[in-house]
Image (spheres, helix red, strand yellow):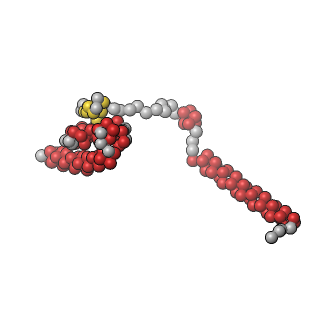
Amino acid sequence: MRYSEQFMEHIEYAFHAFCKIVLRHEAMNAWRDLKRKMEREISLDYLMSERYFEPSVMDSYFEKQDKPTVFLVLGKEVIVDDERLARALSRLPKLRREVMLLYYFVGYRDESISRLYGRCRSTINHRRNVALKQLKKEWEKLEHEEQKADTF
């Protein structure tokens, strides 16, 4: 089916009009978003001129009274600052504790841990999940013991 030249020109003009409407509405949305952003955000320069403050954060590692616990895993030192977490980790079997420390503290993935121990990835994943469940139980035991000690 062949369309006439006049009909094709009409379709082209209609498409151009449609595109202009879409672009106009997108521009209105962009201006509305910018206006909303300007209403809700404050410039950092304005805040700095109002009152002086340091735009930084000081980490407070090891400022507590208790001494951090150091675990040695495959020649790497892993420092655990929380005393209850360190005690709960120390109650885990050695291999489960090492998998937990390597995964959560050192940042190794299951594949790299499995290469270190010569096991498959799914085995390490299973051991980590079992260790998490056991760690949760140990954590709850320690919490219960502390509550019991506080009542006496």
Residue at 48% across / 31% down in the picture?
54
Residue at 80% across / 64% down in the picture?
11
Along the viewing direction, whichever of 96 and 80 lies nearer the viewer: 96
Q: Where is residue 21 in the image (x, y as percent from the top left)?
A: 74, 59
Do we see residue 30 in this rendering?
A: yes
Total label count? 0
Q: Where is residue 123 in the image (x, y as percent from the top left)?
A: 29, 47
User: Which quadrant of the rendered structure holds the N terminus?
Assistant: bottom right
Residue at 52% across / 33% down in the picture?
51
Along the viewing direction, whichever of 147 and 4 lies nearer the viewer: 4
Q: In this view, does 79 lie to the left or right of 14?
A: left
40 lies above or below 101: below
Q: Where is residue 141 in the image (x, y as percent from the top left)?
A: 19, 48
Q: Where is residue 131 in the image (x, y as percent from the top left)?
A: 26, 46
Q: In this view, does 41 lie to the left or right of 93?
A: right
88 lies above or below 2: above
Instruction: Identify the residue at the far bottom of this view.
Output: 1
55 lies above or below 38: above
Q: In this view, does 34 lie to the left or right of 87?
A: right
Along the viewing direction, whichever of 3 and 75 lies nearer the viewer: 3
Q: Quadrant of residue 3?
A: bottom right
Q: In which quarter of the image is residue 4?
A: bottom right
